Image (cartoon, helix red, strand yellow):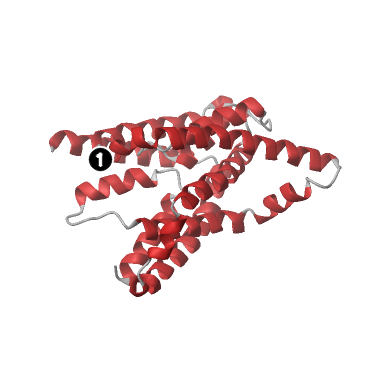
Amino acid sequence: MSIINAVVLGIIQGLTEFLPVSSSGHLVIAEHLLPGWQQTGIVFEVLLHLATLMAVIIFFRRDLSMLIKSLYTKTAEARRQRHLLLMIILATIPTGIIGLAGKKIFIGLFERLDVVGGMLLVTALLLWLAESPRAHKAGRDGNLVDAIIIGITQGLAIIPGISRSGSTISVAMMLGIEAEKAARFSFLISIPAISGAALLNFKEISNLPAEQLPASICGAIAALITGLAALKFLLMIIKKRRLRLFSIYCAIVGCGALLLAFAS
């Protein structure tokens, strides 16, 4: 793998990991459209996931610092942060259960272009509904039941075509959680999710051939930089209530994937 290819893949990973368009869905479509396209090796994938994990940690470093400080302080704000931390833990439990139990079930779907197309339409619908009048009037912080529902949603996002960020943010907003808080919660619960996925394959890092190290590092740096940019851009889009732009995009790509699937 050349440095240029690694950087391009890193940019794609950094953008699609956080923008609500489904990175896995786009990879499946790429396999069907691009001659000679091959999935990247597991080692490179782990490095890219670690890079996007670092992007979330850097971007939300203040939020993470407040969560840690809440464990040894007794202010009213600390109590709110401990509540948020409990919500993150509760959301992570169903995500982990679905991810571990459903991996073998869902793995075959990564070859189904029709499934990707259908699930992209589901993502489009969720993003559209997130901008409903009810969601516009919402403004609460969220409770423990909300956390479990959002965690289940994140677990189901293992299905290619369902955007992790798009589905969790949309469901949170439809539950009545304020938009920016929904986005922050979505990305905070992505930290244990991405960490868990990376740790399961972390031992493979030692198998990285020395000659691929420069390209892999460049790809990871590209994923880190574009991931930070994607996070900032998405939060701006959410603040301006423009999620339906991504809804339209996912609908177009989803319909295209279905047409491609039925034509082949």
What amino acid is labelled 1 in the image?
A: Glu
24 vs 260, nearest the viewer: 24
Horizontal and vertical percent position of residue 23: 38, 47
Residue position for label 1: 111
- For the C terminus, the quadrant is top left
256 vs 99, nearest the viewer: 99
Relative height, residue 38 to residue 104 (above, below): below
- Residue 131, visible in the rendered structure: no
Q: Is residue 70 left or right of residue 101?
A: right
Q: Is residue 22 left or right of residue 186?
A: left
Which SS class for mark 1?
helix
**Hey, which quadrant is residue 260 in on the image?**
top left
Q: Is residue 214 left or right of residue 132?
A: left
Horizontal and vertical percent position of residue 51: 49, 60
- Residue 220, visible in the rendered structure: yes
Residue at 41% x, 55% y: name it.
13
Number of marks in the image? 1
207 vs 222, nearest the viewer: 207
Relative height, residue 200 to residue 112 (above, below): below
Horizontal and vertical percent position of residue 78: 80, 43
